Image: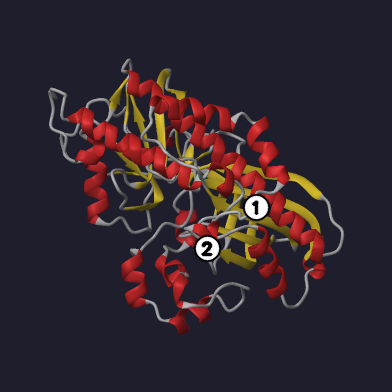
């Protein structure tokens, strides 16, 4: 286990709960810093908050934060993209097996895996393999039980969105590692159903807040919470667990669909043993420093000693397969990506189409204005982010994308 200390103390003077930030050499915006201090002020948060180098302002909780709590849970800290995360697998294909022009392969993947939000991002006819997965996994039956107790959770998206990508920062990529081996990597979560579950329980937590007699100041209504022992606490834990499982199955279903399209257009190949499927928006009970805690990772990846994870860059930059060092100060965590340096609105206002096309010239991907807010300039330097967390992870593989699908 590493004994190197690479974090800064970011909490306000006199604060009872420390904030440890792996932010050397990366930007920490003032509003995100204040948001972290708001969370640290809650009496059930601690023993400290860990902040990853991709940190930036979020809704409720700061993206790139690891928030342990005792006897309480904050739905907005998990957010609405519950279970969002990454999956990657190495194939036996080599760079020389790929065609010079990857446009047809990109079109095939976009046809095989619905992308984007709204109806365009749904399956028009659910593939048999995905329907079987929903039944055999028990996901459909578990959701019925949740909806029976919470009738405001109304969704018919579970069928048509399993195995679909979504929009925003979600993506599918074909990458090459340092040996020119071909990888498939993707980023997605629990889609519309997870969003509805997250939104519903955030609203319920706010409703409960109006009934509570607090012995402390709550600086932000988005930090509304459930206390252990309350019925809504148990119901939320069950629902968020469902969404996290759905997200993991969703990524696996997408991987299978992408690999099917690749087999139609590329030479025969096998899958290597190296594969990863990890969350970076989730909550689970863990033991740290001899204490049972509820650990919320909002844009952070678990990085126990020897555990593999994925840290993606942006559309035109490198990504990494990493191995955790089990750093106790970070609650065994690392960053989930590069982290935004511009809001989506700012990116659309400041990044030109020509700049985006130049930054992604080496990648078969969308070059239109619809993805300007995902252009590399909207994100921090992945090199700086990786340099700030050398005590959290070691790099196992460096990936460079050659094809990127965005919703």
Numbered tag placed on residue 71 in the rendering:
none
Q: Is residue 50 visible?
A: no
Q: Residue at x 70, y 53 (%)?
A: 257
* Residue located beneath label 2 in the image: 407
Q: What is the crowding at mark 2: few (fewer than 14 residues within 10 Å), some, or many (at least 20)?
A: many
Q: Closest to the observer: 120 or 379?
A: 120
* x and y, in percent, of residue 9 in the image: 29, 42
* x and y, in percent, of residue 33 in the image: 25, 49
Q: Is residue 273 visible?
A: yes
Q: CA distance from mark 2 to mark 1?
A: 19 Å
Dots 2, 1 in contact, CB < 8 A:
no
Q: How is the image coloured?
A: secondary structure
Q: Of helix, strand and loop, which one carries label 2?
A: loop
* x and y, in percent, of residue 20 in the image: 33, 40
Q: Which residue is outermost to the right?
A: 268
Q: Which residue is outermost to the top?
A: 229
Q: Is residue 386 left or right of residue 107?
A: left
Q: Quadrant of the N terminus?
A: top right
**In the depicted structure, whether residue 154 falls above or below residue 255:** above
Q: Of helix, strand and loop, which one carries label 1?
A: loop
* Residue located beneath label 1 in the image: 125
**In the depicted structure, whether residue 282 falls above or below residue 362:** above
Q: Is residue 241 left or right of residue 236?
A: right
Q: Residue at x 75, y 77 (%)?
A: 100
* x and y, in percent, of residue 93 in the image: 81, 60
Q: Closest to the observer: 102 or 134?
A: 134
N-terminal label among 2 and 1: 1
């Amino acid at each position: 286990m590493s004994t190197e200390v690479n974090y800064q103390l970011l909490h306000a003077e006199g604060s009872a709960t420390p904030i440890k930030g792996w932010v050397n050499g990366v930007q920490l915006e003032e509003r995100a810093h204040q948001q972290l201090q708001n969370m640290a002020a809650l009496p059930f948060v601690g023993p400290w908050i860990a902040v990853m180098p991709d940190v930036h302002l979020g809704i409720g909780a700061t993206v790139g934060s690891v928030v342990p709590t005792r006897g309480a849970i904050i739905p907005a800290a998990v957010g609405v993209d519950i279970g969002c995360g990454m999956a990657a697998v190495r194939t036996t294909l080599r760079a020389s097996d790929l065609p010079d022009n990857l446009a047809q392969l990109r079109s095939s993947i976009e046809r095989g895996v619905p992308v984007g939000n709204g109806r365009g991002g749904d399956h028009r006819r659910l593939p048999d393999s995905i329907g079987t997965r929903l039944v055999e996994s028990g996901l459909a039956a578990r959701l019925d039980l949740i909806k029976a107790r919470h009738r405001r959770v109304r969704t018919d998206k579970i069928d048509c969105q399993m195995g679909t990508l979504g929009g925003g920062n979600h993506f599918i990529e074909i990458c090459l590692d340092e040996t020119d081996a071909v990888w498939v990597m993707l980023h997605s979560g629990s889609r519309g159903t997870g969003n509805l579950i997250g939104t519903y329980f955030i609203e319920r937590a706010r409703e409960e807040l109006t009934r509570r007699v607090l012995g402390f100041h709550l600086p932000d209504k988005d930090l509304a919470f459930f206390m252990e022992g309350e019925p809504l606490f148990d119901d939320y834990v069950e629902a968020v667990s469902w969404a996290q499982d759905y997200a993991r199955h969703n990524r696996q279903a997408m991987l299978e669909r992408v690999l099917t399209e690749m087999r139609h257009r590329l030479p025969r190949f096998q899958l290597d043993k190296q594969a990863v499927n990890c969350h970076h928006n989730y909550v689970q009970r863990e033991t740290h420093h001899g204490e049972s805690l509820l650990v919320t990772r909002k844009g952070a990846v678990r990085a126990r000693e020897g555990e593999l994870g994925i840290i993606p860059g942006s559309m035109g930059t490198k990504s990494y397969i990493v191995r955790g060092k089990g750093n106790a100060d970070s609650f065994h965590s690392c960053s989930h990506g590069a982290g935004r340096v511009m809001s989506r609105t700012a990116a659309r206002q400041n990044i030109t189409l020509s700049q985006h096309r130049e930054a992604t010239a080496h990648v078969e991907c969308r070059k239109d204005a619809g993805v300007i807010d995902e252009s590399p300039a909207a994100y921090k330097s992945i090199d700086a982010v990786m340099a700030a967390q050398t005590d959290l992870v070691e790099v196992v593989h460096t990936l460079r994308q050659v094809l990127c699908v965005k919703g």
